[in-house]
Structure formats: structure tokens, C-alpha cells
Image: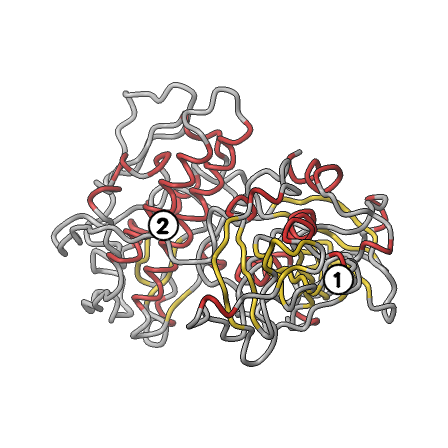
Amino acid sequence: MLSAAFAASALFASATANSLLPRNDQVPVAPCAYPYTAFLYSGCYIDNPPGVGLRALPFATPLEFNNMTVEACTAECKSNGYRYAGLEYYGQCYCGASISSAAAPEAECNFACNGNANEICGGQERLSIYQDPTFPDADNIVESDAYASLGCYTEGTSGRALEYSQYDFLDGTVMTTELCLDTCGAKGYPYAGTEFGGECYCGVVLGNGTVPAADQTQCNMPCNGNADEVCGGPSLLNLYVAKNLESAEPCAPPPVSSVVVPSSSIAPPSSVASSTFSTATTSCSIPSNSYTAPPAPSTTPSSTITPTPAPTSSCLCATPSAWAGSKAVAGYQMPCVGCNDVASQRSSKPFKLFNSKNFGQCPAYPKGKQTNACQDSCKTQYDWCLSYANSCRYKNNAPESFQSANFRCRKQFADCYASNKAVKDDGRCNTTGSNTPATKPEFYSWCKQWLGQWFKN
């Protein structure tokens, strides 16, 4: 696979201990809170024993050991700009721009994650490594001419502008711009900088308050290895960036377009999928936002089945008109946010996001949190959509490319999120009765039927 190929052969860094990188102590950014393309598993890799100071992935995250999951680790590495996330010894999480160690037998990564026993978090001195697929292919990462100059920058005010010093790997007496850029590029770092004539630094982000120098001519020290080149100055960097080493989708909210938010008179969305749905179901009839229960799924949908209409005014969230009904990417619409099916809970938690046919597993929301519920519905739809997009990556006859599907998923999520920023509680769930359109048994029966056609079990 792509991730394994990059990890095994595209890295210039050697798999020997001498090429491993020291742990990094940069101040971490909080885990990515926005939807992002899922990391792909790269394999089991060797990590050096504690105490030797050299590890396969240099950035040690501050995540809670007892709650570790694959998702938590990849979200942390995503927000901090790293290509790779590695989990080790039940609950340790590390990040890196490259994997600077050799692969290990897969059976040696066998420790269950503390936060999810169904996931693997490495082993004893072994890393379960995942790759962010939104980074470009790394075939040409060692070429210095891939970098563009950003000019003269100050060092950071509370630490280094670029966190990874190459002092232990390069001879500063022969420093040149090309030597520094080749070294940083070989290790997968998009940022590189030369300083004080013979120093070289690499990084995935600019940090600690570094800014362009007010006087660009202050970067004026000749490189020790080539007097015709400039290698920064005292506490000043000649800074370079290689865009082909950066993620095409950094941690950020998807671009929000201008959308017309549907009024309360427009039919709200419907549930058509689940967290365990199969992308193969695109051959089924695609439900619309008309709240008509779909026929039973089949290879060739039958037109002789008369579906039972669902109660009106059953779901709370708005669907952007650009993505309504069959316009939803791959037909996977928003799951419904309706009234809690457990009448005794409605006084404290009136709302429920129906994203599983087992209603007991569906999240319920207290009064005043209807906006959270609808935005969670947008996020759930986005997760389902990404499953479709990822299926396009590996199918020869996919209806569209991964890039196209992924872009549309992000756009749909952004519009959905914007449409549900201020959802009002219209009081439809303020009852313990079962005689309103939103609380009738017919609605819950219809909702379970609707969800059932998209679940594998």
C-alpha cells in the first residue's frame, strides 16, 4: 500500500540507530477538532529502548496514557503537522515527519490500547504506525531544489523557530544551503533553515513566535562550506519551505461556502446510514428528504412496494439545499436528530441523534444542546461520507476519484455545520406523551426501518 511503500523505501533516512532522531520538546498544539481524512496503517516498527535519547518518531505527545486510542493519537499528530503517528506500550503516542527505524514483525505489535481494547497500541519498544494520506508522495523528498526561500526570519522568542537541530548529524564547518535542505528533505520536513554560518534546523511548522526579520539584510553570514551562499546570522534564519512535503489538508475547518439555510417549513434530513454501513449499498434506492420510508434494499429496487409515510416534523436539523435528498454525496444524508425515544428521559435529555438502529446506543442531549446534536449529525454524515471517499481510492470502477469525493465531503460538512449553528428548540420534545408527530411510535418504527437497511448487522 501507499503508506507501507513510503515507510519502507521512500525515506532517505537510514534504519540504523545513527539516523534516528532525538525526542522533541516543542509545545504541542491541541488535537485536531475538525474532520480530517483518516490515517492509514503503515505497520509495526522498532523503537529504541527508553533512556537512549534516540527514537523512531521524535515528537512525544502529552496525551493521557490511560485513555489512548488510535483516533486520539492521529488527531494530535494531525494538528501538529506530522505525516506519521505512532502508538507504543498501551498508551504512548509519538509523531514524526518520517519513520527513522526498521519494520518489525507484525506480531510484535500486540498491546491493546488503554482507551479501546479493540485497537492495537504497539508493544514493548514497538510502534504501531499510521500515515496521513493527505501528504504528497515522497519520491523526491531529498531534492534541495524543491524548497523555496521565505527570506530572513528571527529565531523564536520562547524556543527555536524550527525544533529539529541537525547539529549531531552534520558538520557545521562545511555547511551549505544545499546540504541543509537535502538533510531536512530526506527526513520529510517541509521547513528548513540555516543560521550563524554553520547551523541547520528542520521542522514541520514555524513556532515560538518567529517572524520575518524587520531588516532582511541582517541575514548576512556566509555559509562555512560556500562563501557565496548566505546562512542566516546571529539568532536569524535563512528560511525555506517545500510545499510538496506539506499536507494538502492541514487541520482546519473545511471552507464554508455561502448557503441558503432552509427555513423551518422545509423538510428536515433523514437517516440513511450508520457507523457500520457498507459502501456497497449505493446500489440501493437512495432515500430523499420527503420522509417516505424506503423500500427494502435490493439489487434492483422494486417499484411495487408502497412505503409507509413517516410522521412529519420529526427531525430537528437543517439540510443545506445544495445537499438535500439525492444531492447528498453518494446519497448518504444526515442522520436524524429527533425526540428521545425514552419518554422518561425527555425532561432532562429531550433530543437524540438516531445513528444506530439500536436506539440505546444513540447519544442523547440535554436541553439547550440541540445545536450540538445537529452539528454532531453533520460530523456523523461526514464520517460516513469519508468511508465512501476512501472506497473510491481503491476501486477501478469508482464513480469518482478519491480527491473529488473527499473535496465534496468536506464541502458538504462545512455547509451543514454552517446551516446548524443556531438551532432553536421549538418545544416539540417537551412532552412525555406519545401523541405528537415527533413522538408517535410510528416515527420510531419508521426510523428503525430506515436505519436498518444501511446496517450490516
Seen at 57% across and 52% down, the residue is 190
Rendering coords of residue 181 (x, y %): 64, 51
Left or right for 117, reference 378: right
Q: Position of residue 432 (x, y in %)?
A: 29, 70
Secondary structure of residue under mark 1: helix
- Which label was assigned to residue 412? none
Q: Residue at x 26, y 29 (%)?
A: 306
Q: Residue furthest front?
A: 227
Up the image or down, 57 lies above or below 266; here it is below
Q: In the displayed structure, would residue 311 be above or below residue 390? A: below
> Do residues under tags 1 and 2 come within 8 Å of each other at their CB atoms?
no
Give the position of the N terminus as an image quadrant: top right
Residue identified by numbered label 1 = 172
Task: Identify which residue, 5 or 19, lies in the foreground.
Answer: 19
> Where is residue 23 shown, x and y percent of the image?
74, 67
What amino acid type should be assigned to the residue bearing mark 2? Answer: Pro
Towards the viewer: 343 or 292 = 292
Q: Can residue 84 be seen in the rendering of this structure?
A: no
As drawn, is 16 to the left or to the right of 304?
right
Q: In the rendered image, is residue 1 in sight?
A: yes
Quadrant where the C terminus sits is: top right
Q: Is residue 409 left or right of residue 275?
A: left
**Residue 266 location in percent, x, y?**
15, 49
Residue wearing tag 2? 335
Please, what secondary structure does the residue beneath circle 2 have? loop
Q: Is residue 61 left or right of residue 20?
A: left
Whichever of callouts 1 and 2 sits on the residue coming sooner in the sequence is: 1
Front-lying residue, 9 or 285? 9
CA gap, disc 1 to disc 2? 59 Å
